[in-house]
Image (cartoon, grey):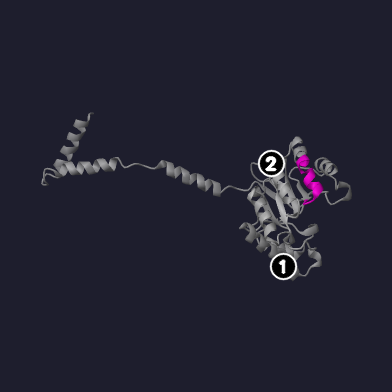
Amino acid sequence: MNKHLIALLSLSLVLSACADQEANQPEETNDQAQEQVEEPEQPEEVEEEVEEVEEVTSEPKYELNEANWTLVPIADAPEQAVLLTIDDAPDTYSLEMAETLLALEVPAIFFVNGHFIDTDEEKETLRKIYDMGFAIGNHTETHANLRDSSEEQQQQEIMTINTTIEEAIGEKPQFFRAPFGVNTDFSKELVASEGMLLMNWTYGYDWEAQYQDASALADIMVNTPYLTNGANLLMHDREWTAGALEEIVLGLKEKGYGFIDPKEIQIPQ
């Protein structure tokens, strides 16, 4: 059907409905109908909105098993993977260790002590580590043994550094690790009320005299009998650990292990 025939049909329909109107009225009405028909739809904008919702509602992939402090898949996630954690940050070697991990494209949690971020320079170091994409955890203000501390002291140890970390990086930590792995009923309740995941470790060696050497430490971290799926590996801001870190990562990769992103760990609500 050509354009002329369409126009004639439209005109006759309008004339029959509006016979008492002026002769130029049907032409105006037809133009208005044409404009309504040609009004464009916007499917691309709708698709973009759907994509944004999917990103926000992504589910965690691992949960903590407190029996041995491993991470267990709860979604479609690899079982043969480990979590790297570094305590006593950011003392002397944390930034170097973060740069090593970044180059290897491996995630980790840096557990921070308050006495290592009490200057502007130290806060800037922490921000650099955070800006590289690493998770920041609470390791107390002064590295005190919580079992030997009063409830008021425990409150200060945990809450003071939470505030300092938030001021430095713009968000509160989601992970907590007590010094020496020692918790109390009070600290557990406080950590839970703050929405943090209380975490210890599966194994670590770098504080033992025989492993205060990069080669020896790398060997035991990769070949220990405690290496298992979801293992939570404890390391510290130490010279020998910084020297061993790349060899540890490459050794774990050679054994087929991947690395758990802290962003994929379920946090208590």
Looking at the rendering, which quadrant does residue 27 occupy? Answer: top left
Q: Distance of mark 1 from mark 2, alpha carbons?
A: 36 Å
Amino acid on which disc 1 is placed: Gln
Instruction: Please state, as top left, top right, bottom left or bottom right, where the N terminus lies in the image.
Output: top left
Amino acid on which disc 2 is placed: Ala
- Which residue was labeled with disc 1? 156
Tell me the crowding category of disc 1: few under 14, some 14 to 19, or many 20 or more residues within 10 angstroms, Cα based: some
- Which residue was labeled with disc 2? 103
Is residue 59 shown above or below 197?
above
**Residue lying farthest to the front in this orientation:** 121
Is residue 121 covered in magenta? no
Is residue 240 covered in magenta? yes
Q: Main secondary structure of the magenta part?
A: helix
Image location (x, y in percent) of residue 227: 79, 43
Please indicate whether residue 180 sits to the left or right of residue 33 in the image: right
SS of the residue under disc 2: helix
**Residue lying farthest to the top in this orientation:** 1
Please indicate whether residue 23 sits to the left or right of residue 155 in the image: left
Quick one: label 1 or label 2, which is nearer the N terminus? 2
Looking at the rendering, which quadrant does residue 159 occupy? Answer: bottom right
Q: Which residues are magenta?
A: 236-248
Q: Nearer the viewer, residue 65 or 95?
A: 95
Q: Nearer the viewer, residue 123 or 222?
A: 123
Looking at the rendering, which quadrant does residue 163 occupy? Answer: bottom right
SS of the residue under disc 1: helix
Q: Nearer the viewer, residue 213 or 108?
A: 213
Label 1 or label 2, whichever lies nearer to me, is 2
Image location (x, y in percent) of residue 179: 78, 59
Check if mark 1's residue and mark 2's residue have beta carbons within 8 Å. Answer: no
